[in-house]
Amino acid sequence: MSKSIQMPALSPTMEEGTLAKWLVKEGDTVAAGDLIAEIETDKATMEFEAVDEGTIAKILVPEGSNQVKVGTVIAMIAEEGEDVAAVAGGDAPAAAAAKPAEKAQEPAAAKAEPAPAKAEAAAPAPAKQAPAPAADGRLKASPLARRLAETKGVDLASLTGSGPNGRIVKADLEGAKEGVVTAPAAKAAPAAAQAPASAPPSAPAIPSTGVDFGIPNEVVKLSGMRKTIARRLTESKQQVPHIYLTVDIQLDKLLALRGELNAAFAARKVKLSVNDLLIKALGVALMQVPDCNVQFAGDTMLKFQRADIAVAVSIPGGLITPIVTGADTKGIAAISTEMKDLAGRAKEGKLKPDEYQGGTASLSNMGMFGIKQFEAVINPPQAMIMAIGAGDKRPYVVNDSLQIATVMSATGSFDHRAIDGADGARLMAAFKTLVENPLGMLA
């Protein structure tokens, strides 16, 4: 009996995804565990394995289709001894029709995609044989390809897409010339810079309807990642009562210890960052103040037995929070090595869902951008996030005398439903003590 292959839910929050690439074609024989497709979620590109064995009889959703709802039938597989032609010609439409609600929701994936393809076919080929733009004027490229192009500084317009309908995919970036700012980024920057300068103070908020208010602009379609960020942070500010607590922390001892440790770790090719030490400090502080290592869960409270720290990492097109599990018990060198690996794979879109979902608290460091102090938005369902500002030389009282010291400001955002102000203050005090006396967190 033929079986349907459905769009998988590759994470608990995934509702739709992009079928980036088929790794099989109609007529191929597959076994359980074989890789059959690459699926792009809002956070990463992941490989999809076959669950059943048989022959790929019919591919119903072409590669490059986006906004494919979870559960949508994307292909049919014929079992051994079954008439493949019969499955492809008869069973496949019937199986697709078995999900009328999803069928109705999926025109963007199954039907809207051919329209840009026709527009591309009609467009004259550029001199460099670059892919023709889609109907909205944007170059057709997978989200992963766009992120890699921005990271490497590659002009997408200079590439020839090997994906469906000339779509630029990851493979097209391999060997591409680096150092050229991507065309989309260069085009978007002037629009972003001009809009605030030309808008009057009393101008109404511009709705996302494409209405022309006479201000030079570019309509940019939101990526799946940006949609998720917008939804989750809106929910956080609307549903989570935030309380903010700020402390100033002297960094001189921590910086001195970092220098000594890096000298000791040089032979192991481990180089600690200040952020690595702060991850450790937050993990230890949460275990010292367990009333802050919690999560609000309606009429119950979850109290965690270890500190898993989600660390904010900026990537092309958004933000992701890879998690250092058990940061309270891991060594500094292990945290540093793990964080470099997580951050690197995050920027390549290769993190697994369990590497960026969960966590008991978060840490966001914007000190490298010169930001002195800020208040971060809590990442639900977590109950706190630590916002780290830049360390700089300031007049500071040390041993009852005014001296010049390296000082940073740290602000904790707490879910007031789960954490009282006094408990939040105890956590901030514990964090400050650990950073100012860093040998204490190495014990």
Image (spheres, helix red, strand yellow):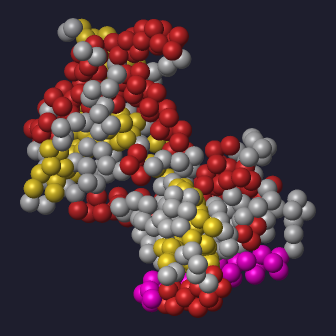
In the image, 269 versus 38, the foreground residue is 38
Can residue 18 be seen here? Answer: no
In the image, 297 versus 334, the foreground residue is 334
In the image, 191 versus 273, the foreground residue is 273
Side of 42 where 175 appears, left or right:
right
Q: Residue at x 87, y 69 (%)?
A: 125
Q: Which quarter of the figure is the C terminus placed in? A: top left
Residue 101 shown in magenta: yes
Which quadrant of the view contains residue 116? bottom right
Main secondary structure along the magenta-highlighted residues: helix
Which span is picked out in magenta?
98-123
Side of 273 where 140 appears, left or right:
right
Q: Position of residue 219 (x, y in %)?
A: 60, 69
Up the image or down, 108 lies above or below 253; here it is: below
Up the image or down, 173 lies above or below 221; here it is: above
Can residue 169 be seen here? Answer: yes
